Amino acid sequence: MNKTEALARQQALVNQARTENRGLTAEEQAEFERCQQIIDAEPAGTAGQGSQGAAEGQRGADPAAPDPIQQALAAERQRTADITSLCRQVGMDAAPFLRDGADMNAVREAAVNFMIQHHGPVGARFTDHDQQQDFRQAASDALLMRSGFAVSSPTEEAYQMQRLSLRDMAIECLAREGAGTTTELLRMSRDDLWDQLQRQFLSPTAAFPAILDNTIRKSIVQRYQAAPTTFQVWTTEGTLNDFKPSKDHEYLLGGAGEFLEVPEGGELKHDTLKTELLPQRKLSTYGRQFSMTREAFVNDDIGLITEMPGQYAAAAKRTINKQVYQILMTNPAIFDGAALFDNAHGNLMETGGAPSIDTMQAIMLKLLRQTDPFGESIMVQPRFVIVPVGYGFKMSQILESPQIDVEGIGSHTANALYQYRNRLQVVEEGTINTLAKGEALPWFMAGDPATGRSIQVDYLNGMKTPSIRRSQPAGRLGYVWDLWMDWGVSVVDWRGIAKNPGAKQ
């Protein structure tokens, strides 16, 4: 058995004990020590120098009376060499054993316990999948907590690693993977450590880049969900499987024929569903690229991993929000050739004005009077009042006041809109103010999507948060990530929304 085989056998013994959650048996301990003797003997290395020194000391003394001082020095050199060699193989710190005068039996016992609790001999890589995943999860949570992110149920290990710098985290990863002892890695310069990490960049099993990926994904999800947008409140959501323009073939409300009375003994009459071709829906890709450079690693700039991806994710959601409200504000021509808000569509107030009981009633009637393409009433139910910032207080007064003042009637007249306070949701959006550019501020009413749709946001395969991918452009020092998201915004019907041109504030 050579040194490599002995190391492998030691690892097998340790793995078996760990799997069964026990220590080594007497027979396993004896076999472990026999393997250690083979490891210590090949090559002799420092131990041989110690033996040579002892021999030299003996040659310089009278054979009949060996010098005890030389013998003690030789024995100490041998002990130091043996302990240092064994500790280096298993990844332990030899200093405490050398300082306390421990003999080899005590060090071997400590080495066995250390390998059971940790990762086995250096060079014999330990691959417990569950432990790897737990460590990576804890390390990712630690980086997020260090940056002020909320983490759900962090482990004790995550709290322990919370104060680690990027360099410390990298050393912990490399030590666990058998790239060296913690002491050896700590002695490496930041540049040398970075070079070693760069070689792991494209490895599918390396821990450090995987931890960075996981941290970035969590940052993206948190920041995307927290971005203050309103489009998702009242638009509908869809999914497409590819980037080809997709015709929205659907059965419209009212497209089926009437139910006909069937006389006794009569037959059911066949009916053909009436359909209408709705607009094309198409996806586009949006994205950015960012990197963690060598300089950022050396400077421990953790924000490039935790903050920057989250900011891009929030920007993606704000972009969708802006695209939706740009449609409302620019009033483009849609699939039938007319503008979205047009008299031909019956969804545009001729005279603009701020929200009031009268203007609210008028815009609600626009929705309630809508018909399908076949002339059947569809009674779109008013559900959302979409207003610019500044009209929210006015809407609260209109909907939450049970009584109002009406000229010529009195000051305690029942407010007809009070009954709608729980049916109408006010959506206040600052993008309307921004896009109005100081002109009149329009406001809108959207119906319940179950009775009438308007704008739809589609995602590729239902993926509603940005995706990331690690890449390594030639000639660039650093970890590089591509961040992208696929979506499309389409007007799918005009019947589910109406517009009041508003007034200048």
Image (cartoon, rainbow, N blue to C red):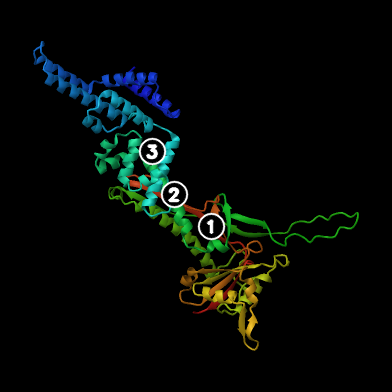
Label 3 and label 1: CA atoms lie apart by 36 Å
Residue 1 higher or lower than 182, as above or below? above
The one of 155 and 169 positioned closer to us in this rendering: 155
Label 2 and label 3: CA atoms lie apart by 17 Å
Label 1: which secondary element: strand
Q: Quadrant of residue 259?
A: bottom right
Question: Residue 12 in the image: x percent, y percent?
Answer: 40, 24
In the displayed structure, does residue 305 sit left or right of residue 88?
right
State the residue position of label 1.
488
Instruction: Kindly tell me whether residue 344 is visible in this rendering.
Output: no
Question: Residue 492 in the image: x percent, y percent?
Answer: 61, 61
Q: Quadrant of the N terminus?
A: top left
Label 2 environment density (alpha carbons within 10 Å; few <14, some 14–19, many ≥20) = many
Question: Residue 411 in the image: x percent, y percent?
Answer: 62, 85
Q: Quadrant of residue 490?
A: bottom right
Question: Residue 48 in the image: x percent, y percent?
Answer: 20, 20
Q: Quadrant of residue 128?
A: top left
State the residue position of label 3.
206
Q: Going by the picture, which residue comes out furthest to the right?
A: 265
Q: Residue at the location (44% across, 53% down)?
A: 220
Q: Residue at the location (53% across, 63% down)?
A: 231
Task: Please identify, in this view, whether the residue under mark 3 or under mark 1 is nearer the observer.
Answer: 3
